[in-house]
Image (tube, helix red, strand yellow):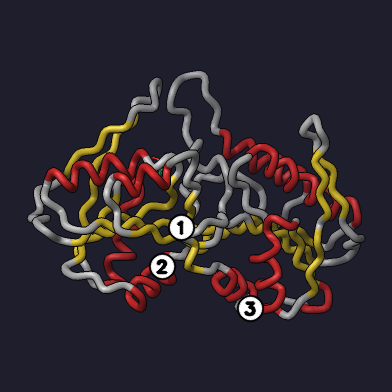
Amino acid sequence: MEKNDTVIISDDRNSSLAKKISFHLDVEYKNTELRVFADGECKIRLDNVAKKNCIIIHSTYPPTDRHLMQLFMIIYKCKEDGANNICVVSPYLAYTRQDKVFIDGEIITINLVAKILASLGTTKLITVDSHSPNVLNCSFATIDLTAIPSLSAYVKKNMTINNPIVVSPDEGGIERAKKFARLINANILSLVKSRDRFTGDVSISLSEQLPLNKRTALIVDDMISTGTSVIKAIELLKKNKIGDVYVICTHALLLDDAKEKLLKAGIKEILSTNSIPNEFAKVDLSSIISDYFLKQ
Ligand code: R5P
């Protein structure tokens, strides 16, 4: 990586993470000024980045479409200026769950996002624990980093957990949960989740009968959005006499009253990264992202 030719770019919302990355990499940080008008339209202002290798740090959590549009504007400006290349680091990339046609007539929305990113001139996209890292059908390079080793290291260092069992709330997240379980030397239990594609209702069942009596469950998932998946998992685990329950995720969206609902369901603690600012973000992604660039 050519330090003098590289800039880290972000808006205020992503500046805490972006500034830490610029510090680790010892490269210039450029802020994008953003203004939102009364009708919801936005405008951005960014200094000229001609001939620079631009690294844009920009998570697209809710309001998702506004944050995506702002990302598109920043990429567009870099391209217009004549940036050398444009690497988008979106630790939380929206629409990764819309990775299939679940009901006839739908679209694979993540592919639409990828097409727009490509058409704007994106040369690389970096995500962290993306819901579906391999699905992107795009012309630029994609890298999915993982926060699982850092999350497990945080648990080992800061939490005293007796007789743990790592639980994946669905089969889609099993590899992530297995990796976490290996790192803390625990067993794994995968639940089976099904979602009614018309109503959105979720139901969760056990795939195997394991003795759970008084064990400590560490539910590991890529994201908590409404909290429904985790709450259904907790209800099932409690019926099977589980002990304490901890929830560990990379992206804590925690929409509406998800936090209150989770606490009411009896969890001990939530642990997440800072891909989305929240009070449970104890694992910082800046070194994971910086290390990737330092190895290039
Ligand atoms: C879906 O398969 C994901 O891995 C998460 O389990 C899900 O998106 C979480 O959403 P919610 O918190 O709304 O249940």
Query: In the image, residue 123 lies at what x, y percent?
Result: 72, 56
**Chain-order first, disc 3 or disc 1:** 1
Mark 3 to mark 1 CA distance (whole Å):
22 Å
* Residue 13 drawn above or below residue 112: below
**Label 3: which residue?**
294
**Amino acid type shown at disc 3:** Leu
Answer with the quarter of the image where residue 186 lies.
Answer: bottom left
Report the amino acid beneath label 2.
Leu
Q: Are marks 1 and 2 in contact (CB under 8 Å)?
A: yes
Image quadrant where residue 188 sits = bottom left
Looking at the rendering, in which quadrant would you find the N terminus? bottom right
Quadrant containing the C terminus is bottom right
Where does label 1 land, which residue? 250
Q: Is residue 34 left or right of residue 160?
A: right
Q: Is residue 206 above or below residue 13?
A: above
Which secondary structure lies at badge 2? helix
The Cα atoms of the two marked residues, 1 and 2, are separated by 8 Å
The amino acid pointed to by label 1 is Thr
